[in-house]
Image: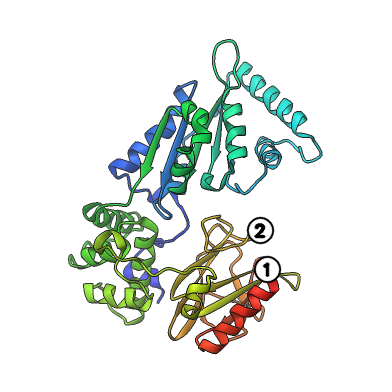
């Protein structure tokens, strides 16, 4: 019997892949979407939406895009570590051009002509930039200039910037005062409160076809909130992992104790917003914390190392979404492709319902505990796992990583 059959579900309720069908419209999520929609009917629409990692920004954007009328033309740029010229190329590529042999002046002319043509044809054009916290000041200045493109009657480019909280700090700097003056609306998407966290879980279960209203005991929701802080992605991870544990034990209902035990297995502490302490999450190499590492991940392409990550206890997502802890820029990789969960016992890799799956020794796997040196194939890349639980081995791996980058 499968996980879905066991709980009588029609689909996975807590997938990490953004899915507009599962959007829970808290008051703040509804308000954020309303701000996005304002760009359609305001000719000078320029909106900035910020929020913590996992707060639901990308899902909101997908919901917004899925409801646009045919008279709306849009471009979505989510790879934001770009030069001004590369940024203009990315926009034009989204609009169907092939601009890679053009100079910046030519790119600007192409874009301006396109915007005027769309306006003349009765179309509205929206530029959406996800992960905008990575934009440099030079690119943000380019966006300011683009926001000023206009006909004799009105501006012809609407803009939505979405990003992590660092974007707020960047926009508030002195050098970007002119850009901020162009922004019509700003909204920060916070975490769910305890009541909304419970409603969020129940909403996703309902959408997934759950007929058991008591699948989670009432006491579970306080524990879920305490460990997740009301951040939707963390709620999903904890609930999904708990259901898998309950399923493997052959049980039909979830107790608060099982949520607690699952959080402990994930290496989580109670969330900073509920007790003042920080949630244990994977992090990259730092000299101060190197002895805490349990896992070293080396990413290879065509036999050559292209990146590496050292991880502490907790969960790390591998995917092409820029907010992934293990970021791999490839069209063969799903936005959130797989997760690596490290603890004192080692590391487990699990496919997150990706399009192309994960392979080990040319065999497709869903979930697998890794041994030192195991190779996981993900798209056209290979991920090599190294066990750093031996303190001496962890130090040696760190030294090698530093020497390799020198």
Q: Is residue 309 left or right of residue 28?
A: right
Q: Is residue 103 above or below residue 293?
A: above
Tell me which label, 2 or 1, sits earlier in the chain.
2
Asked if the residues shown at circle 2 and circle 1 are in contact, with their CB atoms under 8 angstroms apart, the answer is yes
**Along the viewing direction, whichever of 387 and 260 lies nearer the viewer:** 387
In the rendered image, residue 400, in percent from the top left (x then y), is placed at 65, 79
Q: Nearer the viewer, residue 80 or 384?
A: 80
Measured as percent of width and height from the top left, residue 212 is found at 24, 64
- Asked if one can make out residue 311 in the rendered structure from this viewpoint, the answer is no
Name which residue lies at 44% across and 42% down: 168
Residue drawn at x 60%, y 19% is 119
Badge number at residue 381: 1
| Percent position of residue 109, x then y | 73, 25
Q: Residue furthest right?
A: 101
Question: For residue 72, what is the image quadrant?
Answer: top right
Judging from the image, what secondary structure is the residue with disc 1 in?
strand
Which quadrant, please, contains the N terminus? bottom left
According to the picture, the residue beneath numbered tag 2 turns out to be 330
């Amino acid at each position: 019997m499968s996980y879905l059959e066991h709980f009588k579900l029609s689909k996975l309720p807590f997938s990490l892949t953004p899915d507009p069908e599962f959007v829970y419209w808290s008051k703040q999520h509804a308000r954020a979407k309303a701000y996005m929609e304002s760009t359609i009917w305001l000719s000078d629409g320029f909106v900035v939406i910020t929020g913590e990692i996992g707060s639901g920004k990308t899902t909101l954007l997908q919901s917004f895009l899925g409801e646009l009328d045919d008279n709306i033309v849009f471009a979505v740029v989510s790879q934001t570590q770009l030069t001004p010229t590369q940024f203009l190329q990315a926009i034009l590529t989204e609009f169907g051009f092939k601009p890679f042999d053009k100079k910046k002046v030519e790119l600007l002319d192409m874009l301006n002509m396109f915007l005027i043509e769309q306006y003349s044809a009765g179309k509205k054009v929206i530029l959406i930039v996800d992960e905008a916290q990575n934009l440099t000041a030079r690119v943000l200045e380019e966006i300011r200039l683009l926001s000023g493109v206009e006909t004799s009657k009105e501006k012809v480019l609407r803009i939505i910037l979405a990003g992590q909280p660092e974007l707020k700090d960047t926009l508030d700097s002195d050098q970007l005062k002119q850009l901020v003056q162009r922004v019509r609306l700003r909204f920060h998407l916070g975490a769910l409160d305890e009541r909304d966290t419970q409603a969020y879980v129940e909403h996703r279960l309902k959408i997934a076809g759950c007929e058991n209203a008591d699948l989670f005991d009432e006491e579970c929701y306080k524990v879920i909130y305490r460990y997740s802080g009301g951040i939707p992605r963390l709620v999903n991870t904890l609930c999904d992992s708990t259901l898998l544990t309950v399923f493997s034990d052959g049980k039909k209902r979830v107790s608060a104790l099982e949520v607690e035990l699952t959080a402990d297995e994930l290496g989580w502490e109670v969330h900073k917003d509920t007790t003042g302490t920080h949630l244990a999450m994977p992090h990259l190499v730092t000299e101060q914390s190197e002895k805490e590492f349990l896992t070293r991940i080396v990413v290879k392409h065509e036999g050559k190392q292209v990146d590496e990550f050292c991880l502490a206890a907790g969960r790390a997502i591998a995917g092409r979404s820029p907010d992934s802890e293990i970021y791999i820029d490839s069209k063969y990789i799903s936005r959130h492709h797989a997760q690596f969960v490290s603890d004192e016992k080692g590391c487990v890799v699990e496919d997150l319902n990706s399009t192309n799956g994960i392979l080990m020794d040319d065999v497709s796997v869903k979930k697998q505990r890794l041994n030192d040196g195991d190779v996981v194939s993900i798209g056209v890349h290979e991920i090599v796992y190294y066990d750093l639980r031996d303190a001496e081995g962890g130090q040696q791996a760190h030294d090698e990583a530093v020497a390799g980058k020198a």
